[in-house]
Each structure stands twice: as C-alpha cells, then as structure tokens.
Amino acid sequence: MSFLPHTRDEEIAMLEVIGVSSPEDLFRDIPEKLRLNRALDLPAGLTEKAAWDVVESLAQKNKNRGQYLCFRGAGAYEHYQPKAVHHLLSRSEFYTAYTPYQPEVSQGTLQAIFEYQTSICELMGMDAANASHYDGATALTEAALMALDATRRKKIAVSTLVHPEYRETLQTYLLRRGIELIWLSAQDGLTSLSQLEKVLTHNEVAAVIVQSPNFFGSIENFTPFAELIHQQGGLLIAATDPLSLGVLASPGELGADIAVGEGQSLGLPLSFGGPYLGLMACKEKYVRRLPGRIVGKTVDRLGREGFVLTLQAREQHIRREKAGSNICSNQALCALAATIYLALMGPQGLAQVGQHCLEKSHYASRLLAQLPGVSFPFSAPFFQEFVVKTQEAPAAINQRLWNAGILGGLDLGQYYPELENHILLCVTEMRSQAEIEELVRVWGGA
Amino acid sequence: MEKLIFEKSVEGRQGNYLSPLDLPEQSEQEIVPAGLKRKKAPLLPQLTEAEVVRHYTRLSNLNYGVDTGFYPLGSCTMKYNPKINEDAANLAGFSQIHPYQPEESVQGALELMFRTESYLSEITGMDAFTLQPAAGAHGELTGILLIMAYHASKGQLQRDKILVPDSAHGTNPASATLAGCKIIEVPSQENGGVDLEALKQVVGNDTAALMLTNPNTLGMFETQIMEIAEIVHQAGGLLYYDGANMNAIMGYTRPGDMGFDVVHLNLHKTFSTPHGGGGPGSGPVGVKGCLEPFLPKPVISFDEQKQVYSFEEERPQSIGRMKAFYGNFGVVVKAFTYLLMMGGEGLKEVSEKAVLNANYLQKLLSKNYGQPLPGPCKHEFIITPPETKEGKINTLDIAKRLLDYGFHAPTIYFPLIVPETMMIEPTETENKSTLDEFAAAMAQIAEEAEKNPELLHDAPLDTPVSRLDETQAARRPVLRWKEEK
C-alpha cells in the first residue's frame, strides 16, 4: 500500500522543473561510502487488507478486558468511557493537527486546552495547569524538578507508597543531578508522618511527595504533610487520581503547592499502559515554573476573545539549555479525551462514579473478610483499591481466578519484599454485585 | 468564537452513564473521613451528551489539520496519516489490555513491539531499540542518559559536555541540560553544516557526545559526517542522532552507518502517526551494541525455543525507567501498521518522493523568495521573504497571509541562524497540484507584499479570529475560566 500521489508524467514534469533527470540525482550529496547499497531488510510491503490481517491476528493473541473480569489497577484503571469520547476524538481536525503554532487556525485545540486547564484546576483546587505531560510518572518527576529549582535545595522526601514505577522514573531523571532522595516508609498503609518530622530539620528539603489514594489504595491526608514541609520552606507535591476527586477533597484544599496525577482514568482506554495523560497543576506562585505548553486567553485585533500558547519564555524553543524542562510534544489528544469525559460526566456524574468505587470496593472487602485465611493488614480508609493478606500464595489464587476468567489483584511481593502474600485488589464502578460475588466465590476455591 | 463549555452549563443538567448502585447493602459508616471529603463540588460543565458533542464538533471546525489541507510545517513531517492506523490502535486486543496482565495473555502486543524494534533497528542501522520514550524530547533525554551511563561504566565521569550546533532544535540543549550535562554550542557554517575547525577546538576528554540532525535543520545533508564522527570518536565522545529529519534518507543511508551511536526517531513524524494537536507522540531510541546494557527497563526479549516473548526486568546496568509502563503503545501500533504497508522498498520511495517534492517546491518558490542555500535540498528547505520597495516584508506577515489562502503556514523563525527564515517541508504525500497551488499563493503573496503590504500586515482576514495579542496573554495571564461573581 502506498500513499504516494504522482503519476509518471507528473514526476517527469517535476524533475524537468528541478533540472535533474532522476530522483536519484537528488541524493548525490550523500557520500558514496555512506549509501546503503542494498535494500532495507524488512518484509515486503503489504496491501491494506493484508496489513489489517496481520494486526488483527496480533490483537487476537492478546486477551482483552472484554474477555476477562478485571480486578487489577495499580496505576491503570478500568472505568466506563462514554462512547461520545471516542467519537469526538476521532474528529480528524483534532487528531491530525500539530501543536497550535498558528493560533488563528487552531482555536479548536486551543480552546479545548483552556477548558482542560480549567477542569483540572477545578478538580485539583489549583490556580493553573499545563496542557499535559507524558504520564503520571513524568508529571510527578517534573514537579520535583520545579520544587528543586524553586527552593534551590538538593533533597526530596518521597513516600514509598508512591507508585513504584513513578519512583523509579524520578530516580532515573535525578540520576546525575546530585539530589538526595529520602524515602518515607509506610505505617498502617499510610505514609509515615513521624518519619518526615524526623528528617525535616535544617530547611534542606525542597519538597515532600505524597500520593493519595496511594499505591495501596489508602486515602492519605495531605494536610499535616503540607504543614510540616511549609514550616521548613519546602513544597508539598500531591499525586492523585483525578477520578477520586468527585468525592475526595482536592489537593489544593489540603495544602498542596503542586498537584500531579495520572489522567488515564478520565475516559482513556487501558491501551497496555499508554498513551496516558500526565496532569500538572500548581498554585499561582509557581505558574512561571510550570513546564510545557500553557494556553492563555487574549483578544484579537478586533477585540474578539481568542486563545494562544502563552508564557513561552519558559520553554525549550526559546530558552534552549536554560529551559526548566525539555518537553515539547505532550499528550494533547489525551487531554482532550479527559476534557470531554469531565464535560459528559459533570460534577454529579463524577461524584457518582467515585461513590460507586468506594462502595463496591468496600463491599468486596466485606465479602472477602468472610473467607478463611484472608485478612486486612491496614485499617486506613481506601478509595477503590485495598490490600488483602492471604495464607495461600497470591500466584495460586490469581491462577485459579485467571482460569475462571478473572484478572485478580497485583501480587505486592514483587514490589514490596516485606509484603509477601499480599494482594492489591481493585474494584471500580465497572464491577457488578454478581461479578464481585463471583470473584469471592472463586477466590475461596468454591 | 464559540462560548466556553462552562458558559453553556446549566445547573442540574447532566448525562447519565451510571445505573444506581446495585449492592445489597452499603457501608454503615461514611467511608471517607469528614476532613478528607469533597465539600464543594468542582465547577465542571453540566450538559447533556448532545450539547457536549455539538460543542466539541464546533471547536473541531475551528481547527486546521492534515486532513483539512496542506501543512508544510518544517521539521514536523506533517504527512497523511492513514486511517487504518487509527482502527488498528482501537482494536480491543490492543486498546483494552491492562499493562499488568499476565505476559502469556499479551503475546501479540509483545510481538508487535519486538518486531517494531527490529524494523527500526534495520532502518537506522542500530543494534537495539527501546520504545519507552513518549516523545522526541523524551527520547533525547533517554539517549543522553544512556551515553552518560556508558561513560560512567568506563570510569569517564569527567565527560559531561554535550556539543550542540547552533542550528539545532531547542530540545537538544534542553534535554542535555536536564540530563545534568553542560552545553557547548558549536557554530555552523552558512549551509548549516558543522564547522570542523570549530569542532576540533571544543572536543576533548570532557566531551560526552555531539548531538546532530542529518539532514540538518536547513534541509542540507551533512556531507562531512564521516569526518565529524571521526573527530568526536577520536576524542572519546559519542554521536547522538536527532531523528526529526529521518524522512529524508530512509533506504538511502543510515545513521548507524554514518557513525552515530544513539538515535531517536519520531514515530509521529516519519512513521505517519498523527500529532493529535500536540501529542501523543512516540520517541523510540536506538543504540549500538555497546550501549545496549544501559537501555531503560524493561526490555522485551524473545525465547526462540519456546517461541515466547517476555519483559526482562533484571537489567543491572539499566538507566531505569523513563516513564510508567512501556511507552505510548497505542502510537507504536499505528507506526507498526504503517511499516507493514510500506516495507523496505516503500520506505525508500517515501524518502525519494519527500525529497522530490521539496526540491520541486523549492524551485517553484525560488522565483519570488530568497533562497539562502542553493539546492538540491533534502526533504525540507528554507526561504526568506522577497525584497520589496519598502524593504523586506516580514516572515510573520507572509505566514499569516498564507492562512487566508487556505494553507497552514511553514515553520517560521527557525532555524535561528538564518534571520526571517521560513522552513518548508511538503512531505511525500502531497500531490503536484497542491504544490503548484501553494507556489501560486506564495507568488501572489509576494506580489501583494510589493503592491499592498498593508494587506499582509492585517492578515489573516478569513480565519475565525484575526491576529491575537500574545503580549497581553503573557503579561496578564488568564489561564483558566472562573465563575463570574
């Protein structure tokens, strides 16, 4: 299949205008020694139908969530996506546009981003949001960079209950910057506040990073962390699941200076981990340190309202090596999906989804509690995920569930060696009473 | 203009996607402690689905995309995005799989990633690829971290300087800084090529790498690349290839053969995945064998005996993770689909026609516009505004007037080393008539610049809004809607 338009006659006419006899003449500047004097060793090109057969057969080798019941989250969540989200994203005026460098012909993208920034600020309780980052992990990481720059300090305190892959990403980015990471341990499923108290001594810590709901699903209270770190002149970076914010207090209300999160739960498919959506918002004071694109409202020559990319003096294409971040392409289309999702759900819809997640996950935990050998190591309140301690090996339980068409929880032992025989289970609004009961029945070996 | 969606909201209106809670009993006590409960609902829009659909459909009508028309944005490779790509990524077997489901149940996804890596390795002449980076700049950061890990493994901790030509994309120096390196800017010659003498003076035992785009950002092939590679390698540094311009050379030459040690590609440029209004992209990074141990984890491996693909997490020398999970997988599916359709010969033809189109358009525009560099160019070229009796008309005015003619503007004021430049990249999917029409519009604009320059200063006239006040936007930032009190 080719997407090349020229007829033979057209090509001859074009070559004549250029003044060469063949297209090969246009590649004579490539030194002979560097020319690839053989064909690329790739499979021969296919027709559209033949290519479709290949991708379809590869897709069929995967088991999709329509073929099993999903009780696994751990940073990627199955929620309901209203069909209209996908239909609107399929408008090619949106998806085939570039970054809106020419605002006069990009008002659609720009206004949608402005609406996105507004919705994210509303959810997070913040003053400004950027137009998106790659994902929750990189958003959290760049928030840490913001705090390091803002305070000119060299230490960051991070909860060990932040998603393990987010923490690894943070470590990779900070690898060569001489930054000390202080790990805050867990206590009853929540981040240890007393440990933070101990390490905050000499006004040296740039920020503390806490996630809520945390990796164990528990709802953290950001406020005491904010109070402690603020006394020391540092920042609180709050990572959150935006879907929980219909029912949970916003990071802004609880004292966060920068709020980040993974936006996949807002209308994006699981898609094997990406493309997802990095949310980033902050209080007024830090706006000019936000990385990435930001859209602002202004007026045109006739005084009509319109939108442009703004505060670009922060960015790499202007500041080059002095820029605070290198981000250029972001996840704009995913941000559009989240904007549409939030508009479709509205405040009541979002609160309702949150309520269902709360109630259904707690219903599951009450049923599981009746099984022998099952216990709950933590008493902290949780949103849609919780940790279950088992006597039986998690691998055996999960294999039994999988054989019955159920994707069980995550075996936490892989991530936290001290939590051998612990499972992180996720129950969202998608699961019905019958499905939850089915999980518990098979779990129990019946 | 369209009202903001918040201004259309009516209290109490809503779509209804959830059934009432179907549980036999609910929690006896409030689950969420009082202090952690949301007290004031977020001010999200309250509308029916029909209203939301109409709103965003109308917004889409204010946009210009590749499907709308010619989009000659230099360095961005705005080629046609085949529709099959979208359907492929939307297959349930790709879009509805969890990143942590058992490996045995995602063999198709792993095979697709593994095959994509091997195709990209062949196209670029590298030994191994990672698909983890989410965008070009993310790939650059990954690549520089790999280079630094390599030097560290050799005990060469003093190598912390990254050489970057002054014609480079802004992301190059920004990415290297983010990786904790220091930047040394290398001056370019007039054709954008690296000044060898200047290069020789700055390389040394503190050189970590040179970052280069080839063809360079002026659309010219760097003919001295072998000499450049030798100078850098002799000094103990490595060569980094910014793949933004890969569309020019596929099947003709390969970065790996030119001496590059690390490359990043932009799947959203060369490999036909759409740009989404700014993203998601995908910026895979390829390396020569000596850098392979440092690749981000996990890497995908294939057990030929068992015919099983798996994620390898045990990578003691890995730089770590660049993001959560495995990259922008959905974007990779689109590029894979494109690669299947193209094959090796098809990709060579892509580059051939991309270069043909650029040279043809360059020739057509040479009648009216300044051409700082003689052809032939590769897949893109630069021009400058015509001389008029009033002096030069500026590039911004020409770009804005082009919008009135129904075209997207080229990249403007980049590269920085040529003042008032316009960088034009037509891509291979544009037909001769479109190029002719674009050239005719540019000729007419040149004439308008002479006869009626005011028209250009006022442009655009036929767009949903006219020129916007960017100074006011930055001086008094309004970054979100607020309810009027």
Image (cartoon, coloured by chain):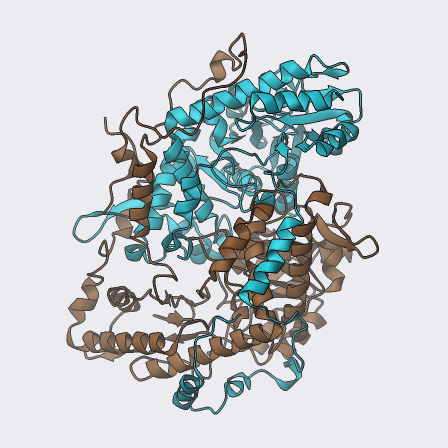
Asked if residue A373 lies left or right of residue B199, the reply is right
Residue at screen point 31% across, 79% down: B369
Q: Quadrant of residue A158?
A: top right
Q: x, y (%) of residue A277?
A: 50, 42
Evaluate whether residue B378 shows in this view: no
From the top left corner, tell me how far across and down residue A45 is, in percent.
60, 70
Chain B tint in image: brown
Image location of residue A128, percent across then percent down: 39, 37
Q: Residue at x 31, y 74 (%)?
A: B438
- Chain A, which colour? cyan
B466 to the left or right of B88:
left
In the image, residue A188 lies at what x, y percent? 67, 17
Indicate the quadrant containing the C terminus of chain B: top left, top right, bottom left or bottom right: top left
In the image, B215 versus B333, the foreground residue is B333
**Frontmost residue, A394 versus B413:** A394
Residue B333 or B31: which is nearer the viewer? B333
Quadrant in which residue B367 is drawn: bottom left
Say whether residue A242 is visible.
yes
Vertical comparison of A111 with A121: above or below: below
Q: Is residue A37 above or below residue A104?
A: below
Above or below for B477 versus B174: above
* Residue B172: quadrant of the picture: bottom right
